[in-house]
Amino acid sequence: AQTVTQSQPEMSVQEAETVTLSCTYDTSENNYYLFWYKQPPSRQMILVIRQEAYKQQNATENRFSVNFQKAAKSFSLKISDSQLGDTAMYFCAFMNSGYSTLTFGKGTMLLVSP
Amino acid sequence: DAGVTQSPTHLIKTRGQHVTLRCSPISGHKSVSWYQQVLGQGPQFIFQYYEKEERGRGNFPDRFSARQFPNYSSELNVNALLLGDSALYLCASSLAPFRTGSNQPQHFGDGTRLSIL
C-alpha cells in the first residue's frame, strides 16, 4: 500500500515571500502520479499542480512549482510571491497509474500573513 | 459550467440511523469517487464508480455502499451510523479513470458535512 507523509502540520509565511511544503511517499510502483491539492477553509478541494513520475522535468503552474525527486520519493511544493488567498490546507496526494484513486497525506496548513 | 455538486451541504443524524448523500459530476464526467475526510486528516478513499460499475473500494465496512445512475450521478449510503462516521464526505469526478490511459485529474465538490449525535 502507498503512504504519503507531510511532516509539517503548519507553516507561516508573509505576503510576497516564498515557502516550500514538504511531502514524501512510499511506493513500490514505477509509474504513478503526484498531486498537490489546496483546500481553503470551508471550501472545496482544488487541484494546484500535478506531476507524472515518468517525466523528469518538474511541473510548474504560474507561482507554483514542484521539486520531484523520484529516487528519494520526495515531492515538495514551492509557492513563490505568496498571496493572502494562498491561505489554505495543502494536501499532497499519490495516484498509482494502474488505478485512479488518490492517497492523501494529512495536510499542511499554510497561513499567509500581511 | 457547473462543477461537482453535492447535497445536502450539512446533515445531522443520530447513531443507528441511515444516511444518503448525493453527488452530481461535472457534465461529461463518467467517473465518480467518494472520500471521507475526518477533521484534521486527509481524505480517505471509499468508492469509485465508472460507467455505473464499482471500480474500486477502500477499507470501509459493509455499512458503506454506493451506486451510480445512468446520468452518472451517484449516491453514497451509510447504514447504522456510528459517532466515528462524523466527517466531511467528498465527491470527486473525472472524465475517466487513469486506468484507461488518459491523464484525467479528479475535481472535487464542496462536500457534505455529516455530524452524528
Image (cartoon, grey):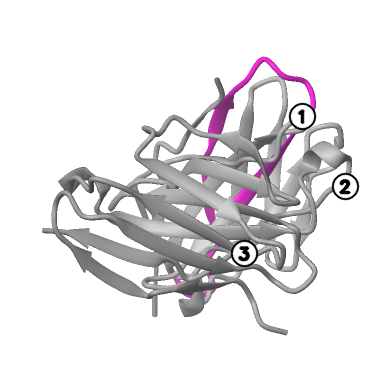
A20 lies left or right of B64: right
State the residue in front, A74 or B10: B10
Which element carries disc 1, helix, strand or loop?
Answer: loop
In the displayed orientation, state which residue is furthest to the front.
Answer: B70
Residue at 41%, 53% in the rendered image = B77
Q: Are marks 3 and 2 on the same chain?
A: no
| Along the line of sight, the residue nearer the viewer: B16 or B43 | B16
Q: Name the residue under label 3.
A: A80
Which chain contains the residue that carries disc 3?
A
Q: Where is residue B43 in the image (x, y as percent from the top left)?
A: 44, 47
Mark 3 Cα within 10 Å, few/some/many (few <14, many 20+)?
some
What residue is shown with label 2?
Answer: B102
Front residue (pair B7, A101)? B7
Q: In this view, does A71 lie above or below B25?
A: above
Give the number of the disc on residue B103: none
Instruction: Name the kind of residue labelled 2 in the image.
Output: Ser
- Indicate the amino acid at tag 1: Gly
- What span is colored magenta in the figure? A12-36
What is the CA distance from the residue labelled 1 to the residue labelled 2? 11 Å
Neighbourhood count class around disc 1 (C-alpha, 10 Å): few under 14, some 14–19, many 20 upward: some
Q: How far apart are marks 3 and 1 (CA)?
A: 33 Å
In the picture of the structure, the residue carrying the numbered disc 1 is A98
Q: Position of residue A86 (x, y in %)?
A: 50, 71
Q: What element carries label 2?
A: loop
Residue B81 position within the rendered picture, expressed as x and y whole percent measured from the top left: 23, 48
**Are there few (<14), some (14-19), or many (20+) residues within 10 Å of tag 2?**
few
Type of amino acid at the residue the image marks with label 3: Ser
Q: Is residue B28 left or right of residue B22?
A: right
Chain to which mark 2 belongs: B
**Gap in angstroms between the C-alphas marked 3 and 2:** 30 Å
User: Which quadrant does the N terminus of chain B fall into?
Assistant: bottom right
